[in-house]
Image: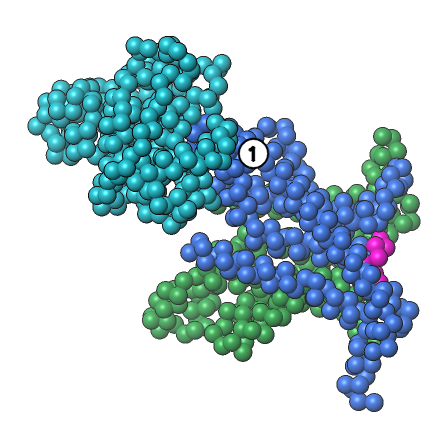
Chain colours: A cyan, B green, C blue
Amino acid sequence: MSKTTTRPAVRKPEAENGGAAPGAGRPTLEVIGLRKSFGTLEVLKNVSLAVEKSEMVFVLGRSGSGKSTMLRCCNRLEEPDAGEILLEGQPITGSGVNLDKVRRRIGMVFQGFNLYPHLDARRNITLALRKVLKQSRDEADTRAAAALTRVGLADKAGNYPSQLSGGQQQRVAIARAIALEPAVMLFDEPTSALDPELVGDVLGVMRELKEDGMTMLVVSHEMAFAREAADRVVFMADGHIVEQGPPEDLFTNPQHESTRAFLSRYSYGP
Amino acid sequence: MDQLIQQFFNIDIMVQALPTILRGLGMTLLICAVVIPLGLAGGLMAALASTARSRWLRWPAVALVDLFRAIPPLVLLIFVYAGLPFAGIRLSPFVAVAIAFLLNNSSYYGEVFRAGLISIGKGQWEAARSTGLTQRQTLTHVILPQATRNVLPDLISNTVEVVKLTSLASVVSLGELLHAADLARSVTYNASPLTLAAGVYLVLLWPVVRLLSRYQRRIAV
Amino acid sequence: MSNLDRFIETFLNGAVLAKYTPAILQGVWVTIELSILIVIAGTLLGTSLACIRAYRLRPVSFLIVIYADIFRALPPLVLILLAYFGLPNVGVTLSSSTVLFVILGLTLGAFAEEIVWAGITSTDKGQWEAARSTGLGFTQTLIFVVLPQAVRMVIPPLTNRAIAITKMTALGTVIGVPDILNQATTAQSFSGNASPLTLAAVAYVVLFLPFVILSRWLESRFAWKKG
Ligand SMILES: Nc1ncnc2c1ncn2[C@@H]1O[C@H](COP(=O)(O)OP(=O)(O)OP(=O)(O)O)[C@@H](O)[C@H]1O
Ligand SMILES: [Mg+2]
């Protein structure tokens, strides 16, 4: 695995909104009593979850248990039916919220990368910098170069997505998100569309983000990685969070029946 | 506003023109019944020739198809109808229309069929031939059914264009729908017969156009 | 006189060609001018309407669909005659060239709207989500992310349609637009010889064949990329 050593300190400047952050002391991301149905199918039934600053939280659960839906509610790609979501103490649910402003503070990485095929790696990253943050071309290019360096792809700035491997595409997608300096990053199965030998590169980048203090909420089936890197693991079943705790506890001593059933299939059970 | 209704939607005049226009519709349908099968057959041959392995077949076929895609159908029609008599070849309007449309439609249907043929992989040919089917049998029983299904929306949308194209026959005074309506227009000094003709075309073609949009959206999703 | 001589005398008569070439060249300019205007207006109109439709405001979308359906279902010649002979009686007098431009521009607009809309709807949903999750607004996503991809997808079918509709400028002859065909039929009746028609056909081939070949090339490139 090729790790980047030259990592410029592109750290999130504290309190962009000036002075004492209003959310000081509160979790970075807070989900309270979230509910969501599709037609008659109740996918999320009262989900509550808090992600502390610089914490990496893993979400596990069977297919269809509502993991993606919860994640997508967090930046309102899905509109929650009920409940509240707070970003750094500020509510982001409700109608008075400027969604575009909120979303730039929440990075999202998709299973299918979703890079823009008509733009090269650099411009995939600079598009939002220029159109949302209204940066100049030079500013945006500098920021994009830093982000690409951070994911180990400084030399791929001019490549189009079709000229990159899956692992490289996903790392560009991560760079696209971190370039906006989000308060929290959401990952929805970032490695499950990748060939096994490319998974490590992406996980390596995520590990480095964590070491740099990024707050992350990750849906993934990479158990070994969760065990080693996550601060906390959350297990979802049937629209509920049934159990959560430090990875060691959850993996070695699961309390809930469905957690045990799930883990035994991945042979991580006790 | 009154004037507008009077000029474009005059019911009395429409009723008066209706029998003429219905006769015109009959002619339009007759033209369609002749030129659509002719165009399909010509198009199929053009497609087979332009996908043939021999370049002595392929190149001339492609060249002819492109030539007739470059010439406006009305130019073709006037050339056949008004030009050929100078060479002693005098054709009735109907035959002139049939010939001009055959040339034009064959090239358009030809392109559609060609796309269909190309969409079928070599594996289908090989599989069929390996079971002992002849080239001809493979084509008619294996390749063409699949090719046609793959390009069905394009075939239908091209057929809509052919039906619309029959309106050009009015230019050589073949008494089809538009000609009948325009005649009534010039007699009554009122555009309502043309509106009526437009209505008839809409009744004929709107459902097809709508269907095509739906169908295309389904594929896209 | 041999048959070949008679053929040349009738369809490629040097004297007749020499005499009427200037008139037909004038027609060529009229055809080119109209074609360019129609393509620009039709493409812009269709693309704008497809974008407006993306906002999914029901009454607006409904009107756009009605417009696109009508202009795709009606033969342009019907609309040309309707506009040319009907409008003056309600006090709107347009020149024959204007009528031709408006009707064919609207026709191309209708087809372009459907084609671009198909391109927009077939753009992957993930593209919208990725763009919106970086804080781009709906309009920004449409313009910078979705439309460029849709346009790439629709260039081959749009080119084909644009060729088919600009060729219809020949219909202007019927209402007296001095285009290639009109000049040629006039010359033909004056000279009593078919050569001007031959020249007209040649002029159309010279004008449109490059675009037909271009569209063939675009299509093969497109198919190759997909496969
Ligand atoms: N847009 C939608 N419309 C209707 N049903 C949906 C929609 N999105 C998700 N669902 C349904 O909601 C349920 C939960 O879906 P979700 O994608 O959140 O599950 P998941 O835990 O992420 O599963 P996986 O591990 O397969 O990704 C599933 O039954 C799914 O079919
Ligand atoms: Mg999921």
Q: If the image is split into quadrants, where does the C terminus of chain A sit?
A: top left
Instruction: Judge whether residue B182 can be spotted in this image.
Output: yes
Q: Is residue B101 above or below residue A137?
A: below
Tell me which residue sits at (55%, 48%) in the image.
C154
Instruction: Judge whether residue A69 can be spotted in this image.
Output: no
**x then y, percent, for residue C70:** 69, 42
Look at label 1 and name its amino acid: Ala
Q: Is residue A116 above or below residue C22?
A: above
Location of residue A103 by image quarter: top left
Q: Which residue is mark 1?
A: C54
Instruction: Answer left or right for A40 relative to B216.
Output: left
| Residue C178 within the segment the image draws in magenta | yes
Q: If the image is split into quadrants, where does the N terminus of chain A sit?
A: top left
Instruction: Answer left or right for C203 relative to A132.
Output: right
Location of residue C106 by image quarter: top right
State the SS at label 1. Answer: helix
> Is C191 or C77 nearer to us in this picture?
C191
Instruction: Answer left or right for A88 relative to C28.
Output: left
The stretch of residues the image draws in magenta is C174-183
> Is A253 or A186 nearer to us in this picture?
A186
- Which residue reaches farthest left? A270
Q: Name the chief secondary structure element in magenta.
A: helix
**x then y, percent, for residue C20:** 86, 69
Tell me which residue sits at (37%, 10%) in the image.
A20
Tell me which residue sits at (48%, 63%) in the image.
B117
Q: Chain of mark 1?
A: C
User: Is ligand 1 less than 8 Å from the beta carbon at label 1?
Assistant: no
Tell me which residue sits at (87%, 49%) in the image.
B184
